[in-house]
Image: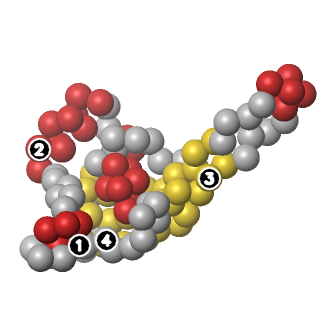
Amino acid sequence: MTDDVLVDVTGLKKYFPLQQGIVARLRGEDPDYVRAVDGVTFTIKRGEVLGLAGESGSGKTTIGRLVLRLVDATEGTVLFDGIDLNALPAGQMRRLRARMQLIFQDPMASMN
């Protein structure tokens, strides 16, 4: 990673298990999953702004929550200023979040 890269996301995935019925759980069947985010890769250089656009339910908010480590990734890496966020203890991650921000767009205001 070069010095001008601030955020480097590679192969980011988040799968949420679907609710199983009691019979499937008793049989020990593996649950099915919803692939909310499946293999996202991007970089953000210092001074850049990234906007995610897509249909409702396409994973935009989940990507933001994964980058901030508000939810744990199923797979993939997130580097912030060269620091592997998955390797940080919770206390250090909380302090580092002060340098990050998600801005959610109000869809009604965007059409005005």
Q: Is residue 42 shown left or right of residue 45?
A: right
Whether residue 6 is visible to the viewer of this picture, yes or no, is no
Nearest to N terminus: mark 3 or mark 1: 3
Nearest to N terminus: mark 3 or mark 4: 3
The numbered disc on residue 58 is none
Nearest to N terminus: mark 2 or mark 3: 3
Q: Element at badge 3?
A: strand
Alpha carbon distance from label 2 to label 1:
18 Å
Q: Element at badge 1?
A: loop
Residue at 31 percent of width and 31 percent of height: 89
Which mark lies nearer to you, 2 or 1?
A: 1
Q: Element at badge 4?
A: loop
- Residue 64, horizontal then vertical, whole percent: 32, 56
Alpha carbon distance from label 3 to label 1:
25 Å
| Type of amino acid under label 3 | Val
| Type of amino acid under label 4 | Leu
Quarter-of-image position of residue 5: bottom left
Cβ atoms at labels 2 and 4 below 8 Å apart: no
Residue at 58 percent of width and 45 percent of height: 16
Q: Which residue is mark 4?
A: 52
Alpha carbon distance from label 2 to label 3:
31 Å
| Type of amino acid under label 1 | Leu
Identify the image quadrant of the N terminus: bottom left
- Residue 11, horizontal then vertical, whole percent: 50, 64
Cβ atoms at labels 1 and 4 below 8 Å apart: yes
Q: Which residue is mark 1?
A: 50
> In front: 92, or 36?
36
Q: Which residue is mark 2?
A: 98
Q: Which residue is mark 3?
A: 34
Quarter-of-image position of residue 95: top left
Q: Residues within 10 Å of mark 3 (few under 14, many from 20)?
A: few
Q: Element at badge 2?
A: helix
